[in-house]
Image (cartoon, helix red, strand yellow):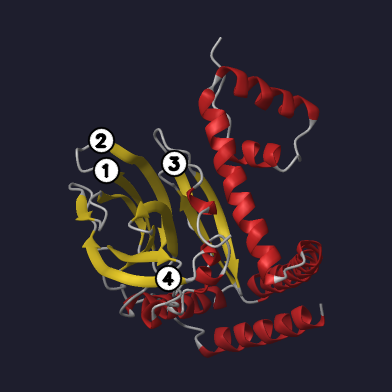
Amino acid sequence: MRQPRLEDGTLMRFHDGELDAEDARRVALGRLVDPNVNVRLDALAALGSAVRAWAARAGVDAAAERRRRARAQRRRRALAACGALTLAAALVLAPRAKVVGVDTVDASEQAASDMHGALGSVRGPVAVEAVDFGVHPGSIFSVRSDASETTVVWLPDDAGAVATGPL
Amino acid sequence: MRLGLALGVVVLSSVTVAAEAHPTRQSDPPRAAAAAPVLELLVLYATNQKKGIDPRVRDLSELTRPPFASYDSYALLERVRLPLATERQQTHRLPNGRVLGAALVENPSDDSVRLSASISEPGGRAFLPLLEVRARVGQRFIVAGQKYESGILVLVLAIAR
């Protein structure tokens, strides 16, 4: 029987030991019947090694970083909830004002898009809707930096490419 | 939380004032048609030659984060603009001989597009058969990892108008 293709996210969680027993069993079965699953896991391992080596070299405390991000996420959620509540109240109290607000946003976005060299003028990850890595082991992840998040498609010629270099 | 409440009060006040300032507005002027989307491509060469990051791409903060921080030198090899069209795939030959192809899949709004990209070997065989993304104008993404000389290629892509 042919196994359904395992999602990249599932493999990442398997690699990080975060899958429940049933999903972990499904991945383990996939490794037995599909050699490509092992190749993809190797790529994730190489990527993880590179990140861990960088963290060690840069003196980054991963646990402290996770705690800091969790605190920041809680603050963002509270702010977003307040913002949404206020916007809802504004729309109810002054429905005509919605048009004015939208115009203002459009004008500023148009100005941004008119800038020469649009690289990086809009923050946030790009949505990957479909990907076919072919015969090469690839992975998709995002890189956070300051207030931005960038989608990265990593497709090395071989699974160990990330770990080469000074690590 | 206090910041959120303060922000809410400011937004509510400004929205109310704006509504009062334009009480009889009938219709909006038609917006100018957006220019055709263009794929901006930066081809970077990542190595460990201790040369640092090219000043022209120093604002790409991703390069200082893992896994890109595994390389200490980034050189800007090319900066290319490929006009996107639905009918025809635009191509660009990369320094390693492979060919990047890109085509517009859909143009759902002025500020976002769906595009498909692929990378082919010189012989025509696919290296990256398909990558389809939905991106807003100015939003960048990165395709990296291909071997090139003593390092790798890092392709930074974004949609422009």
Tell me the chain of label 3. A
Residue at 60% x, 73% y is A147
User: Marks 4 and 1, Cα distance to the nearest angstrom?
Assistant: 28 Å
Q: Locate the C terminus of chain A and report the quarter of the image it occupies.
A: bottom right
Q: Are marks 2 and 3 on the same chain?
A: no
User: Marks 1 and 2, Cα distance to the nearest angstrom?
Assistant: 6 Å
Relative to A69, residue A154 above or below:
above
B30 sits left or right of A47 in the view: left
Please say whether residue A49 is visible from this viewpoint: yes
User: Marks 4 and 2, Cα distance to the nearest angstrom?
Assistant: 32 Å
Residue A150 is situated, as x and y percent measured from the top left of the image, at 52, 62
Residue beneath disc 4: B49
Tell me the chain of label 4. B
**Cβ atoms under marks 1 and 2 closer than 8 Å:** yes
User: Marks 2 and 3, Cα distance to the nearest angstrom?
Assistant: 19 Å
| Mark found first going from the N terminus, 4 or 1 | 4
| Mark found first going from the N terminus, 4 or 2 | 4
**Cβ atoms under marks 1 and 3 closer than 8 Å:** no
Nearer the observer: mark 2 or 3; the answer is: 2
Tell me the chain of label 2. B
Residue beneath disc 3: A130
Amino acid type shown at disc 1 = Ser
User: Marks 4 and 3, Cα distance to the nearest angstrom?
Assistant: 35 Å
Q: Are marks 1 and 2 on the same chain?
A: yes
- Kind of element beneath mark 3: strand
Residue beneath disc 1: B120
Q: Are marks 4 and 1 on the same chain?
A: yes
Residue beneath disc 2: B125
